[in-house]
Amino acid sequence: MTPRLVIVPGLGDSGPQHWQTLWEQKYGAARVRQDDPDRPTPGAWSARLQDVIDATPGELILVGHSCGVPNIVHWAHLYGGHERVRGALLVAPTDVTDPAVTGEYPAIRALAPLPMTELPFPALVIASENDPYSGFERAQEMAHAWGAEFISAGEAGHINVASGHGTWEDGQVLLSECLHAWTPPEITRF
């Protein structure tokens, strides 16, 4: 059986044309819906992620974007992961310590400090070389600290609708490669 995706959006819950929403519909993914998607806190956002994991049967792949990435990292730090989580796709991680970013979005200061310890499951960080919400070298530092593989998306902005990433076909290819790497060969994949 194919692992089920768990979509973990960032601020604002990823709108209807965002690749996370389109993937949710295409793959029948579960989705983390925060009570307040504009005011993240590690405790509340991690608890909601845990609720979705508990309610979603089978093996899981977490798919975080922007502030959804710190959500996954805080959850792993607070809860120690989960035996059914096979891996995480961590896309365009927001640097919650960058004064330029927190100046524009003060609410994300609540996600600092970001745990910089190895994740208890395999992960792939995909970062853009011109992401306005995280420097490329900072994204590499995060991936290294989390024990994650790292891939450059080139100059892709924040890898969202505003930067021209609707269905994000390249991301679907990377997702497929992750499924092959993180699951046994007899598992049916997308």
Image: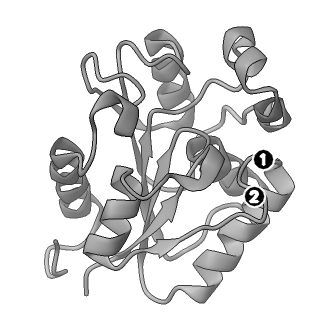
In the rendered image, which residue does mark 1 sit on? 40
Nearest the camera: 176 or 98? 98
Mark 1–mark 2 distance (CA, rounded to whole Å): 6 Å
Check disc 2 and report its element: helix, strand or loop. Answer: helix
The residue at 67%/31% (across/down) is 116
CA neighbours of label 2 inside 10 A, class few (<14), some (14 to 19), many (20+):
many
Mark 1 belongs to which amino acid?
Answer: Pro
Q: Quadrant of the C terminus?
A: bottom left
- Tell me, yes or no, whether the two marked residues, 1 and 2, touch with CB atoms within 8 Å: yes
Percent of width and height locating residue 105: 73, 27
Mark 2 belongs to which amino acid?
Answer: Trp
Say whether disc 1 or disc 2 marks the residue closer to the N-terminus: 1
Nearest the camera: 13 or 130? 13
Nearest the camera: 72 or 29? 29
Q: Judge left or right: residue 144 versus residue 51.
A: left
Q: Judge left or right: residue 54 versus residue 4.
A: right
Q: Judge left or right: residue 85 versus residue 22.
A: right
In the rendered image, which residue does mark 2 sit on? 45
Reply above or below: 68 against 63.
Answer: above
The residue at 47%/63% (across/down) is 7
Number of marks present in the image shown: 2
Reply above or below: 149 against 182.
Answer: above
Percent of width and height locating residue 61: 41, 65
